[in-house]
């Protein structure tokens, strides 16, 4: 049996039990490889309970820098008897299985086409420690030590990472180092090493940073000038609000007086949180909330008010599996339609689609500008895969001289000079009216904010012409947004082709890798990554320029495809859905296989016609 052999290019997966303390050990493993200069992309797949259910931690090691899930596992660390059979099944032929061999398992539990490494971890921990919790925790560090020798990982780096983690806690540091070396010693004395899979020092990380999207978005909100956050805890967005609070304590506290220059409110529910944000936006503050799909469902009435009353609001939706409670700790891109058209009646909202933590940072800051400029709710559509998993990305650019775009705000001086103020009047032809902040002038510039129909001067009106004027002006404003939002990015194939592909958000890393794999196999695609809604006119041009366009997304109902058909009146037959929605991040292999099957079937149909 030929063993898999690869250097700096493999997938390892840890199968653990939630609450066993494995997460920190698995992260230690990933960071050690990163410190060796080799790009890694870890993904934590965890259940929505506190402890006891299966959890997995998958690490993609790839010197070329591919950060999407590849599909398949080269080395499985199987520590959970509950999921043993499924975990062993995932291993690629010629791959490796590392398990706790304290209790012997029958031959039927293994495969003939993989290499098995048994280490009596429980037995070794029981000999070394008497405390039950220590035995559980140090078993995880022990298998990291074993892997360091099996994969040729620099143990000095692991020890330095432990030193950073337990700085000032020497007793814990010494115990962790002991566990690390117990694992190494066992491999050195009993197991042939290193394996065919190896890690070698490299310099492919460069100046990239390692951060998750929720932290990046929180920092982006600080950079973009947000001073108000109202939120209600919900997986997977809660850590975003918590990170915002941490950064506000660092950057939003007056150094002279110690006064907080921010307001963060954990509301009693999602409805209250969006209500607070709408109120803060009306008062002129830069305000946002962070939530997930179920929260958006509850917020729709206030979102509709903000749209119709034209109040700046930023909503960061960290999408998860739905509908209803769905899969709280799994990832999807299934909130597009619910957010794009949130609220009853004719409504359209601006959506931004970041692909990684770097764009989570920039798009969150930009969303606050767009909300003020357009006087409307703006959604940042991230998801669990981006939000809760650390990812290598370009460093953030921070400009202390950044000027916030507050949009059309009429001043007291302009009002005093007699300038005409119609709160809902389009004076520039872009659909965006002027607004005033509360208290701008003692007797000019005031208006009554309502969710009912009105005339251009904010006076209550149910006259058909007034309603039509307002609704058509809102559409004009939405059209104006096309030029203000992040524009789509085009990637041309290496040779002319009639085939295209559209994708967005967290599909990007796997999509980039799939495109290269498809080209090697003779399938050439022009690709367009959509970064915002409303869609730029160039999106329609791209579709029209190709006979067929694959639309890659992570939901069941092809929501992006539906929006493209709805907005452009496209022939649905031109848009071929490529859908992945089992809750795990899409893989390059899935995209490659699905598109090759579609292309092959189409070519066969053409051949049959000729015959």
Image: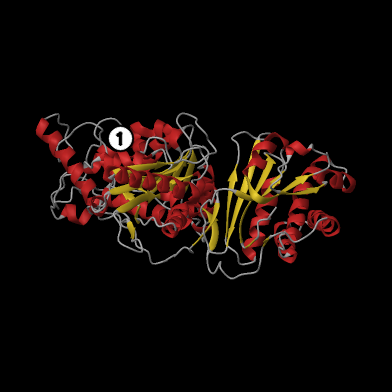
Residue at the front extreme of this rendering = 611
Q: Nearer the viewer, residue 521 or 60?
A: 521
Residue 100, horizontal then vertical, whole percent: 78, 44
Tell me the colour scheme of the image: secondary structure
Which quadrant, please, contains the C terminus? Answer: top left
Q: Identify which residue, 382 or 184, lies in the foreground.
A: 184
**Label 1, residues with CA under 10 Å away: few <14, some 14-19, many ≥20:** many
Percent coordinates x, y for residue 413 in the rendering: 20, 56
Q: Residue at x 42, y 32 (%)?
A: 271
Q: Is residue 237 left or right of residue 152?
A: left
**Residue pointed to by mark 1:** 304
Camera-side residue of 447 and 339: 339
Q: Is residue 141 left or right of residue 36?
A: right
**349 vs 544: above or below:** above
Q: Position of residue 545 (x, y in %)?
A: 24, 54
Q: Is residue 405 left or right of residue 388?
A: left
Query: In the orientation shown, which residue stands out farthest toward the left?
Result: 465
Front in this rendered view, residue 556 or 109:
109
Q: Residue at x 34, y 34 (%)?
A: 302
Q: How many dots with numbers?
A: 1
């Amino acid at each position: 049996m030929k063993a898999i052999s690869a250097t700096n290019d493999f997938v390892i997966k840890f199968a653990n039990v939630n609450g066993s303390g494995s997460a920190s050990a698995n992260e230690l493993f990933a960071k050690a490889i990163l410190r060796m200069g080799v790009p890694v992309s870890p993904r934590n797949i965890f259940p929505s309970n506190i402890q006891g259910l299966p959890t997995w931690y998958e690490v993609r090691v790839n010197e070329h820098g591919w950060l999407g899930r590849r599909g398949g596992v080269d080395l499985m660390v199987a520590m959970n008897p509950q999921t043993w059979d499924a975990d062993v099944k995932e291993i690629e032929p010629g791959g490796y299985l590392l398990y706790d061999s304290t209790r012997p398992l029958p031959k039927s539990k293994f495969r003939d086409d993989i290499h098995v490494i048994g280490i009596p971890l429980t037995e070794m921990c029981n000999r070394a420690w008497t405390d039950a919790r220590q035995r559980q925790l140090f078993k995880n560090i022990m298998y990291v030590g074993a892997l360091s020798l099996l994969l040729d990982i620099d143990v000095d780096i692991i020890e330095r990472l432990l030193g950073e983690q337990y700085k000032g806690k020497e007793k814990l540091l010494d115990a962790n180092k002991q566990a690390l070396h117990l694992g190494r010693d066992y491999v050195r004395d009993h197991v042939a090493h290193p394996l065919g899979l190896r890690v070698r020092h490299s310099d492919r990380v460069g100046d990239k940073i390692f951060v998750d999207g929720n932290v990046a978005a929180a920092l982006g909100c600080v950079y973009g000038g947000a001073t108000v956050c109202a939120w209600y805890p919900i997986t997977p967005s809660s850590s975003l609000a918590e990170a915002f609070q941490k950064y506000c304590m660092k950057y939003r506290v007056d150094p002279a007086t110690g006064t907080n220059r921010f307001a963060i409110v954990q509301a009693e529910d999602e409805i209250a949180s969006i209500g607070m944000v709408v109120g803060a936006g009306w008062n002129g503050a830069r305000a946002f909330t962070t939530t997930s799909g179920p929260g958006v469902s509850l917020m729709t009435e206030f979102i509709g008010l903000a749209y119709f009353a034209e109040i700046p609001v930023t909503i960061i939706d960290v999408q998860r599996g739905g509908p209803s409670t769905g899969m709280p700790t799994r990832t999807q891109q299934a909130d597009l339609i619910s957010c794009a058209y949130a609220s009853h009646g004719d409504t359209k909202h601006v959506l931004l689609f970041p692909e990684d933590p770097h764009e989570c940072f920039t798009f969150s800051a930009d969303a606050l500008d767009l909300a003020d400029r357009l006087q409307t709710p703006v959604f940042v559509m991230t998801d669990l895969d981006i939000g809760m998993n650390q990812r290598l990305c370009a460093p953030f650019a921070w400009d202390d001289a950044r000027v916030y775009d507050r949009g059309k705000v009429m001043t007291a001086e302009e009002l005093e000079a007699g300038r005409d103020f119609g709160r809902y009047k389009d004076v520039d032809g872009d659909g965006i009216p002027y607004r005033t902040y509360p208290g701008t002038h003692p007797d000019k510039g005031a208006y009554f904010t309502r969710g009912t129909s009105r005339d251009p001067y904010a006076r209550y009106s149910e006259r058909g012409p007034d309603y039509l004027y307002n609704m058509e002006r809102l559409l004009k404003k939405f059209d104006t947004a096309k030029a203000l939002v992040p524009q789509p990015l085009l990637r041309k194939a290496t040779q002319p082709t009639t085939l295209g592909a559209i994708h967005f958000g967290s599909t990007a890393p796997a999509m980039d890798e799939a495109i290269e794999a498809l080209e090697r196999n003779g399938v050439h695609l022009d690709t367009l990554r959509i970064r915002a809604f409303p869609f730029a006119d160039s999106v329609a041009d791209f579709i029209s320029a190709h006979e067929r366009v694959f639309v890659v997304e992570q939901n069941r109902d092809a929501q992006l495809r539906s929006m493209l058909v709805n907005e452009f009146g496209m022939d649905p037959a031109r848009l071929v859905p490529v859908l992945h929605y089992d809750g795990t991040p899409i893989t390059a292999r899935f995209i490659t296989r699905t598109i090759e099957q579609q292309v092959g079937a189409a070519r066969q149909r053409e051949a049959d016609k000729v015959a």
